[in-house]
Image (tube, helix red, strand yellow):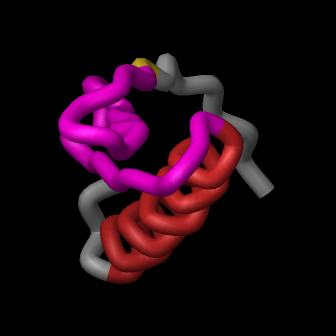
Amino acid sequence: MKIFHYRVVVWKERGACVSKCPELGVSSCGGSITEAKENLKQAAGLYLENAEALGLF
């Protein structure tokens, strides 16, 4: 299993918290900073699973 470390940027926008991983180009949102980060973790995981299956990594 490979371990990757990526930056996470979180900001508030129109009453929601937005999270983004600039290196992957993946973003998500949530009602709180914690929720936005958890949603991004899930989205990034799905992205990486598919990228690996497609041979991108």
**Residue at the outermost right position:** 1
Toward the front, the furthest residue is 15
Would residue 21 appear left or right of 6 to someone viewing this image? left
Give the percent coordinates (x, y) of residue 32.
59, 44
Report the side of 54 relative to 44 (left or right): left
Residue at (35, 26) in percent of width and height: 12
> Residue 24, located in which quarter of the rendered image?
top left
In the rendered image, residue 9, in percent from the top left (x then y), is placed at: 41, 19
Looking at the rendering, the stretch of residues picked out in magenta corresponds to 10-33
Residue 14 in the figure: left or right of residue 33: left
Relative to 43, say whether 24 is above or below: above
Foreground residue, 55 or 15?
A: 15
Query: Magenta-highlighted stretch: main secondary structure?
Result: strand
- Indicate the quadrant where residue 51 lies: bottom left
Instruction: Tally the marks.
Output: 0
In the rendered image of this protein, does residue 36 appear above or below residue 44?
A: above
Q: Position of residue 29 (x, y in %)?
A: 38, 52
Q: Is residue 1 above or below residue 4?
A: below
> Residue 25 lies in magenta, yes or no?
yes
* Of the pair 1 and 37, the residue shown nearer to us: 37
Across and down, in percent, residue 54 comes to 26, 78
On the rendered image, what quadrant is the N terminus found in?
A: bottom right
Residue 17 falls within the magenta-colored stretch: yes
Residue displayed at 43% across by 24% down: 10
Q: Residue drawn 26% across and 59% down? A: 56
Against 54, is 51 above or below? above
